[in-house]
Structures are given as C-alpha cells and as structure tokens.
Image: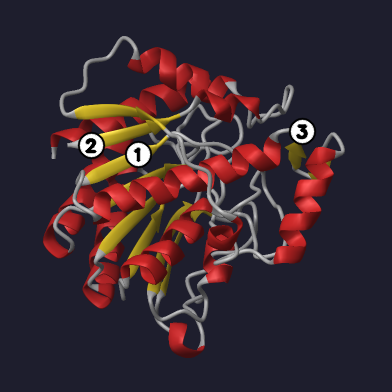
C-alpha cells in the first residue's frame, strides 16, 4: 500500500506568476481525480512540524527571520524565492507532512508514501532560503528518522534536475545520512561535482552524478542505476527518501534533461528494487521541482503508479 499525502493548505503559499505556483499541485490533484491507481490511499495532512523538529536542521535565527518576513507580508526573501503572508505556516505544514509520512512508514502503517507538498526544500540551507525553497523537508525527515526512530542509515535519492545543494551541505559531515543526486551540469546551483563526496565522518556518503544536457535516456537510466547500486551497497539503508523533482522532463521550462513522463516510473522502479533489497521496501517520496504543471501531473502519476504497484 502507498499513502498519498495532500493538503489544500499548500495552495496558500501564494507566489503570483512565479514558476513555483499553486497550479503545480492543482494539476496533480485534478489528474489524480480521473486516474485509478490501485493500492493508493489519499490522506489529507493534518500535521505541522514543531519548531523543535524543524530545528533538527535549521537555525532558530533563520526561522525567526523568515517567519517575521512572511508575517510582514512577504516578497522576495532572496533573488529566486517569493513568499507571502502564509508561506512560513505552509512550509511548516509541508515539513510536518514529511514527518507524518516517515512515521507511518516506520511504524508499519504503510510501506511507501508520497507527499504532494510545496514549497519544495532541497536547496534550503541551515540558515538561508534558496531556489524556491524555505525549509529542507527531506533533511528534516531524515534527521527525524534518526532521532525519533534511532535509524543509523538513511539514503536520500534526489532526481530533481537541479543539484540538491542544501541537502548535501546539511549532511556533508554526517555518517548516518547518505545523499545521492543525479542532476544536470553545468547548471543551477553550480554544485554537485563528482568529487564532492563528503568530509570527516561523512567522507564517502555523498554520491553525485552530474549529467550533460543531451544525454540519451538509456544512458541516463543505466548510469543512475549503476551509481544507486553502489551507493546502496555502501549505505545499506534502513529507509530511502526520494527528493522527487520532475523538472528533468523534456518540456520543463526551468530545467529539462530530456526525460518523458513515463521515465519517472522507470526511476521509481529502480529505487524500489533497491528499497526491497535493503529496507523492506520502505520509501518516502517528497515533491521537489517540476514547473510545467501538466507534465508535472503526468510524471507524478507515473511515479505513483509504480510506487503503488510494487
């Protein structure tokens, strides 16, 4: 069984004509209303992350700053990132959704979960918003799994077209969280070189697969699978988290790495094969990028179909 977490409160993060807009989720909700996906349970998220849970990753000073900025009406918190009156509350709701998904998976209520959340998170740093992201949802989820459930090995798989620099930075010296990112390069945010592998206790826990624009889809899949197998053998994860960005789609206006909507089902199959081998199929997937609302919805349905059928 797979749980699909949703909430119309995520639409209250109002960004105007910004690429990261509420139409992204509306298109997912609309398409899912016409699709029948077996073993998919839809749940309205009721949970906000507490300040203590968010501070597993983010500094108190940053949280106070972003909360006040939103309370005063918002605007551009940095060059790429727009917030409005309710954006901080919505971001806490998104992080809470990720935590609820981890809870249900690790407590055996479901084997897999997908969180249709916004704003996205993988660019957010400990003390800085960046790249449309306010709170690093996947990092908060990983830390929560370790602190609350005493996991020792969590693997984050990030297939967003942009390198998850925030997630990498947060766990760069962490021996408990391994981070594997496949992304377009050279491209925003300019990080994610193959030689970025972690330092100190985290040395060897960072796995970067930078790919040039124009790579064939077959080559993408084979290289993705090969490096994921290597990362999983090293990590032997007890839980896999996916930063599921869909902006590698060939029609995405912000990214693109030549993928089709159905290709995200293939990426899902590869990750689930690894999860079944190492962690009894336990996977929590969190929405990141994807800025062509129609193609985002199609890609999400492809992802959910495989996630639910495994």
Q: Are marks 1 and 2 in contact (CB under 8 Å)?
A: yes
Instruction: Tell which residue pokes out farthest to the top in this image.
Output: 34
Residue 267 location (% of width, % of height): 29, 44
Residue 160 location (% of width, % of height): 47, 46
Q: Secondary structure at mark 1?
A: strand
Residue 260 in view: no
**Above or below — where is 116 with respect to 52?**
above
Q: Earlier in the sequence, mark 1 or mark 2?
A: 2
Residue to which mark 3 is pinned: 84
| Location of residue 229 (image quadrant) | bottom left
Q: Residues within 10 Å of mark 1 (few under 14, many from 20)?
A: many
Q: Residues within 10 Å of mark 2 (few under 14, many from 20)?
A: many
Residue 24 in view: yes
Mark seen at residue 114: 1
Q: In the image, what residue occupies the spot 66% across and 49% down?
A: 134
Lateral position of residue 154 relative to residue 119, left or right: left
Q: Earlier in the sequence, mark 2 or mark 3?
A: 2
**Above or below — where is 231 with respect to 183?**
below
Residue 39 location (% of width, % of height): 16, 29
Q: Secondary structure at mark 3?
A: loop
Q: CA distance from mark 1 to mark 2?
A: 7 Å
Instruction: Tell which residue pokes out farthest to the bottom in this image.
Output: 200
246, 143: nearer the viewer: 143
Residue to which mark 2 is pinned: 2
Where, quadrant-wise, is the N terminus in this rendering?
top left
46, 133: nearer the viewer: 46
| Location of residue 41 (image quadrant) | top left
Q: In the image, what residue occupies the spot 56% across and 69% down?
A: 170
Q: Secondary structure at mark 2?
A: strand
Q: CA distance from mark 2 to mark 3?
A: 32 Å
Q: Earlier in the sequence, mark 1 or mark 3?
A: 3
């Amino acid at each position: 069984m797979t749980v699909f977490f949703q909430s119309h409160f995520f639409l209250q993060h109002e960004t105007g004509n910004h690429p990261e807009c509420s139409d992204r989720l509306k298109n997912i909700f609309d398409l899912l209303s016409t699709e029948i996906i077996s073993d998919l349970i839809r749940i309205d998220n009721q949970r906000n992350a507490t300040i203590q849970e968010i501070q597993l990753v983010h500094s108190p000073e940053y949280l106070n700053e972003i909360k006040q900025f939103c309370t005063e009406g918002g605007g551009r918190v940095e060059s790429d990132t727009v917030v409005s009156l309710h954006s901080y509350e919505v971001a806490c709701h998104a992080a809470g959704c990720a935590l609820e998904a981890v809870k249900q998976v690790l407590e055996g209520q479901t084997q897999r979960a997908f969180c249709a959340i916004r704003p996205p998170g993988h660019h957010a740093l400990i003390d800085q918003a960046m790249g449309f992201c306010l709170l690093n949802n996947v990092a908060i989820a990983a830390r929560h799994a370790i602190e609350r459930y005493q996991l020792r090995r969590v693997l984050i798989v990030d297939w967003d077209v942009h390198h998850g620099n925030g997630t990498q930075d947060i766990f760069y010296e962490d021996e408990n969280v391994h981070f594997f990112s496949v992304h377009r390069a050279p491209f925003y945010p300019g990080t994610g070189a193959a030689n970025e592998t972690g330092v100190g206790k985290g040395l060897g826990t960072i796995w970067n697969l930078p790919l040039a624009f124009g790579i064939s889809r077959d080559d993408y899949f084979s290289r993705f699978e090969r490096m994921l197998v290597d990362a999983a053998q090293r990590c032997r994860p007890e839980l896999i988290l996916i930063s599921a960005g869909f902006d590698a789609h060939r029609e995405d206006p912000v990214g693109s790495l030549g993928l089709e909507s159905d290709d995200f089902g293939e990426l899902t199959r590869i990750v689930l094969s690894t999860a079944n081998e190492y962690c009894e199929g336990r996977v929590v997937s969190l929405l990141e990028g994807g800025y062509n609302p129609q193609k985002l919805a199609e890609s999400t349905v492809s992802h959910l179909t495989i996630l639910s059928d495994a």
